[in-house]
Image (tube, grey):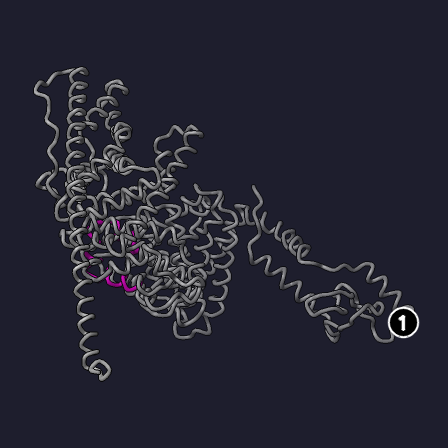
Amino acid sequence: MAHRAAPTAILQAAISKFEERSDGVSGLPQFMAAPRFAGARPGYYFGRGASGVGYYLDSKQAAPAEGEADDDAGAAAAAAARARARHVDAGELLREAEEAAGDAGMEMLDAKGLKRLTLQLERKYNSNLEARMRYADQPDKFMESEADLDEAVKALLVVASAPDLYPELVANTSALQTLLALLNHENSDVAADAVEVLQELTDSDAVEDAEEEAEVLVDALLEADALQLLVHRLSAFDEKASSEEASAVYNILAIIENMIDLKPSVAEDVVEQTKLMKWLLGRLRPRDTDSNKQYASEILAILVQQSDANKRKLAASGGMDAVLQAIAPYRNRDPESTEEEELLENLVDVLASCLLLEENKSVFVEAEGVELLLLILRGKRLARTSALKCLDFATTRCPPACDRVVDQAGLKTLFAIFMGKLKVPKKKRDEASTAGEEEERTVSVIASLLLNCSKQSRRDRVAAKFVEAEFEKCDRLMEVYLRYEGRVAAEEARLAEAEEEQEEDVLLARMDAGLYTLQQCALIVGALWLVGDVGVRKRVLRLLHQQSHTVGSLRSVLLEYRANLGDDGPGGAEERARQVERATQMLLAMGHDPAEDEAAAKEAAAAAGGAANGGAAEGGGAAAAAAAPAAEGDDMELEEAEEGGKGGKAAAPAVPAEADMDVEEGEEKPPQPREERRGGEGERRRSRSRSKERRKEKERRRSRSRDKKRGSSRERRKERSRSRDREGRRRSDRSRSVERRTRDQRSRSPRGRR
């Protein structure tokens, strides 16, 4: 059998023994200060220690007895004793403890020793049970048997060092049944010791290398209704009565966590079969924070992360409101300890996990969760990043939450964070999440507002923010977009050099580099493009051109986003169709030609040998590549269309009537050829015809634009000439008026009269 590390109790016993041995010499001082060595002193050694420099009492040396010998003999005896003595340091003490525990450890690993311990527990348990029944009214007569029972329970702690004996413990002993029965013992100390033994047996460190044996133990506990017994005892312990009972509560929570680690299905079973969820939510209510409250929040987070059924039950039982009330104190203050910081993180994890279910979002909105998160965002506290995370989860595909953000004046706070104007103080920010996470969360929330608000008026309020202060928010948006585009491009180059072949791994690597935030930025630009503000469009194009980019780069990102939309999320195929339609509207508004999608799909299908799935997967990238050569021409067309727009609205392609966003009527599409031919030759001819028509239309637009500019120039010159004439007349009138006033003054003065 493999030798395992000795339990902590053995090492503590060795340390206590050493301390007793060190303090056993009586009548002599433990330390005598001396700045320098002044000769040998019997029973002491000179050195620097915890008390400073001087002579320290050495228990290995024998102190001289009175009248034992003369000074020379005493000095010789002391020298001999020092020669035999040695100073015991911490490392040597640990080795001695391990050696002392070696024999005991070998005994613990023995099946015979396990049998002896379990039989001893049975005898002590039966003896105590009999004494309690016989002397029910005389506690002093069964106290001794109770103390023996407590020692027998603690003796089972050594079994945790031998998890390979767990099958033997389950199959050939009744120790588990006895320990579970002791959970209902009237003496809370005995019950607490039984809980401690179960916690040690299931501890992750003890079963790290013996998972199969540990699963046998967990299965046996589940068959014996351990979950019900543990949760029942959880409510019976009084944490305020003693520290032992508070520790027992902590150990019960640890047992449940250990069982979930070994068997994840326990997370759903314990919520379904017991009242653990109710107890955990109640434990969050007290204002004071301690280790048990923090651990309760951690267990609650584990439960909701493991099961959707647990998420639903928490929301249905009023748990959403309880979690929000537990978070509420941190809108005005920061966590004061590490325990409070962990508590806040756990509560945020609980809230974020529950918001993954669409039905829970309505409960969150009704509980005024959006208002609480906005208060936290305005408070410049450590909880701000956590609040942004929850707000991001809440506004994703949830129009009521998005409407509430706009109606509760959340745009001002949200865009202040987006612009970096609402900063957390440095002394607090060092311990908070990085600014990058806040940036990504804010971009995601803004995209959700533009895409999910139920009314166009609210979407217009969000879009109007990008026009304020000389389009500063447009500048910030494109700065973020270009930065993340560079990150993703760098990661793609690295993956190309590494020759990564797994498509899923490539996608995950690109997502880690910032692909999601890049797509959200492109969606924001697309939504703004649909609004049709000429100033925003020109600003975006100018910023792209400054970095040698075109609107084609935005279209490429949107094409990939549309191609990778799946129907396995909330809403299924219906939600996917809505998102595809919305992305298509944005692409059309940016000048994307739908014919390019068809051509790209056919090319991809041909390259894949006619496999339809392969063609669909490659459609987005091929279409982006086909659109790239004509990107600059598209930009020119967009700019010319904007210059010819009326009322501040640029022309945009027509979209279906059932679209969820209001857009302007689009330009006429180029006329299609009369002959519809099959095969590649017909397709190429139609493509060339469309290209010719586009070039002619472009020349007509340029001609109209030049004529308009010439006419505008002539009008401006005439206006300037008329302005100069009017200014000249005003000046001449003023000069004549001054001359008249001067003559009048002179005529009225005495000198003038003379």
Quarter occupied by residue 214: top left
Range of magenta residues: 350-376
Viewer-proximal residue, 440 or 244?
440
- In which quadrant of the rendered image does the C terminus lie? bottom left
Viewer-proximal residue, 349 or 150?
349
Left or right: residue 128 versus residue 752 is right
How would you rate the neighbour count of disc 1 (Cα within 10 Å): few for under 14, some for 14-19, many for 20 or more? few
Image position of 327 with respect to 27: above or below: above
* Count of numbered circles on the image: 1
Viewer-proximal residue, 311 or 574?
574
Image position of 435 with respect to 594: above or below: below
Q: Amino acid at mark 1?
A: Ala
Image position of 466 with respect to 372: above or below: above
Q: Residue at x 78, y 60 (%)?
A: 85
- In which quadrant of the rendered image does the N terminus lie? top right
Callout 1: helix, strand or loop?
A: loop
Viewer-proximal residue, 474 or 658?
474
What secondary structure do most residues of the magenta stretch adopt?
helix
Quick check: is 358 in the magenta stretch?
yes
Left or right: residue 1 versus residue 497 is right
Q: Position of residue 450 (x, y in %)?
A: 21, 49
Image position of 492 with respect to 37: above or below: above
- Residue 455 visible in the current orientation: yes
Q: Which residue is mark 1?
A: 69
Q: Position of residue 732 (x, y in %)?
A: 18, 62
- Residue 576 visible in the current orientation: no
Q: Position of residue 263 (x, y in %)?
A: 36, 45
Q: Position of residue 329 (x, y in %)?
A: 33, 68
Q: Residue at x 73, y 65 (%)?
A: 48
Kindly give the residue lying farthest to the front in the view shown.
754
Q: Residue at x 38, y 37 (%)?
A: 509
